[in-house]
């Protein structure tokens, strides 16, 4: 893989700046504090700022990428964004002491794209308001959901690794970044059907919604098997759904880091749609399917912007959960009072576009 002299100079300068922070005493201290928290020995509540409104933050031009090579332009963005957060609003963030290289993984997805109508735009951002067209109108439409086909371009990966090792020689090690699975399949369903249609069908044709969940569960189980057979799961990012995952137990001591599996890492699940339905709907349409998926992973981060304080006992029926999101729509005091002691409360105190997550044990 060819890189111009200018691109090499840019990337090496950014990597040097990044590694200065990544090898600092402060970074090492934060990593160990997250590790203690994740192992049940919290020293203090930990704060992470994630999912930034990047289009609003580039006040000095530092976030403008200049590298011409498409792959390493992505690496450049990762370095610039991480440096920016560390230097401007680090909170308790941690930088990995190596450069992550996204693996050239192919995934055909579930076979359905998103058919949407744009309602509003922002010239500095992507679409900000849209309407989703229902693609699952009848029971036979469930067959539109396909099993994802996962692949890896081994030759391209070897080329990337060879180029990166030469590029960052004397500055940083490189490691591969694999899959982290998004098991919040209701997010996909709402974009295939539209939110209102989902609610109507949960009432009028629950059997069709069960058929959709069954098809998605079977397809995801097959996807998990493919990922594990190819050894593509992620164990090097050390973050899952806005929260750091450092611990003494994952990945396990027997993990083959060249071929990691889902049992070596984290995944995240959620059913944000169910904020506006009863806990009983969660028990019927979410729990039995996640009970089949979650056992395949080392740990699960559960929840996002959904209200969960009124159904924590139901969430606890799903295995391998370690962290649970307390969104601004949950009653925080009620959440803390009812959170099982083996879980970490991931508190999100602000509904603003900038997500601030504070994690702590009950």
Image (cartoon, rainbow, N blue to C red):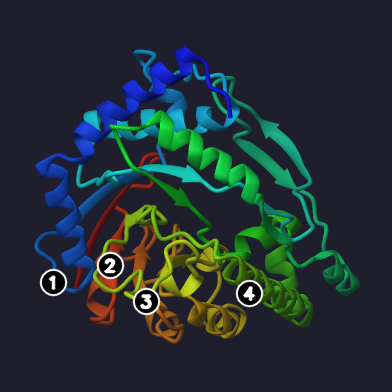
Q: Quadrant of the C terminus?
A: bottom left
Q: Nearer the viewer, mark 1 or mark 4?
A: 4
Q: Using the image, tell me which numbered label, if any, was put on residue 41.
A: 1
The residue that mark 2 highlights is 345
Disc 1 and disc 4: Cα gap in Å?
Answer: 34 Å
Disc 2 and disc 3: Cα gap in Å?
Answer: 29 Å
Dot 1: element: loop
Where residue 183 appears, as percent x and y from the top left, is 56, 67
Name the side, left or right, on which 74 lies relative to 94. right
The residue that mark 3 highlights is 254
- The structure residue drawn at horizontal position 25% and vertical position 34%, both measured from the top left corner, is 19
Q: Tell which circle, 4 or 3, labels the residue nearer the N-terminal end.
A: 4
Q: Nearer the viewer, residue 204 or 308?
A: 308
Image vertical order of residue 112 relative to residue 63, above or below = below
Disc 2 and disc 4: Cα gap in Å?
Answer: 30 Å
Name the side, left or right, on which 317 lies relative to 19. right
Disc 1 and disc 3: Cα gap in Å?
Answer: 24 Å
Image vertical order of residue 289 relative to residue 258, above or below = below
Q: Nearer the viewer, residue 33 or 205?
A: 33
Where residue 55 appears, as percent x and y from the top left, is 47, 25
Disc 4 and disc 3: Cα gap in Å?
Answer: 19 Å
Q: Tell which circle, 1 or 4, labels the residue nearer the N-terminal end.
A: 1
Q: Tell which circle, 2 or 1, labels the residue nearer the N-terminal end.
A: 1
Q: Quadrant of the N terminus?
A: top right
Q: Nearer the viewer, mark 2 or mark 4?
A: 4
- The structure residue drawn at horizontal position 56% and vertical position 19%, both measured from the top left corner, is 68
Q: Tell which circle, 2 or 4, labels the residue nearer the N-terminal end.
A: 4
Name the side, left or right, on which 181 lies relative to 121. left
The residue that mark 4 highlights is 225
Dot 4: element: helix
């Amino acid at each position: 893989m060819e890189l111009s002299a200018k691109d090499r100079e840019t990337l090496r300068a950014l990597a040097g700046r990044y590694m200065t922070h990544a090898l600092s005493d402060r970074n090492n201290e934060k990593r160990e504090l997250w590790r203690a928290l994740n192992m049940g020995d919290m020293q203090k509540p930990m704060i992470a700022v994630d999912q930034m409104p990047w289009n609003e933050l580039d006040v000095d031009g530092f976030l403008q990428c200049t590298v011409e090579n498409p792959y390493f332009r992505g690496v450049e963005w990762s370095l610039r964004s991480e440096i920016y957060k560390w230097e401007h609003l680090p909170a308790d963030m941690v930088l990995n002491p190596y450069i992550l290289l996204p693996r050239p993984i192919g995934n055909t997805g579930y076979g359905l794209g998103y058919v949407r109508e744009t309602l509003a735009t922002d010239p500095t951002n992507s679409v900000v308001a849209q309407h989703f067209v229902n693609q699952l109108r009848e029971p036979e439409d469930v067959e539109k959901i396909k099993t994802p086909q996962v692949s890896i371009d081994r030759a391209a990966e070897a080329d990337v690794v060879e180029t990166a090792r030469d590029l960052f020689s004397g500055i940083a090690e490189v490691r591969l970044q694999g899959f982290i699975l998004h098991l919040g399949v209701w997010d996909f369903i709402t974009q295939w059907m539209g939110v209102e249609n989902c609610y109507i069908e949960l009432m009028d044709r629950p059997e069709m919604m069960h058929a959709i969940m069954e098809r998605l569960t079977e397809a995801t189980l097959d996807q998990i098997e493919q990922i594990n057979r190819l050894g593509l799961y992620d164990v090097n990012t050390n973050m899952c759904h806005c929260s750091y995952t450092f611990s003494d137990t994952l990945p396990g001591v027997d993990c083959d880091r060249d071929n990691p599996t889902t049992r070596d890492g984290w995944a995240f699940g959620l059913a944000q749609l169910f904020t506006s339905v009863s806990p009983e709907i969660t028990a019927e349409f979410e729990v039995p399917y996640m009970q089949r998926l979650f056992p395949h992973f080392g740990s699960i981060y559960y929840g996002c912007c959904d209200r969960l304080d009124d159904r924590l006992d139901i969430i606890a029926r799903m295995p391998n959960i370690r962290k649970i999101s307390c969104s601004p729509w949950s009653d925080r005091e009620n959440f803390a009072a009812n959170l099982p002691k083996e879980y970490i409360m991931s508190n999100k105190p602000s509904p603003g576009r900038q997500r601030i997550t504070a994690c702590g044990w009950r």
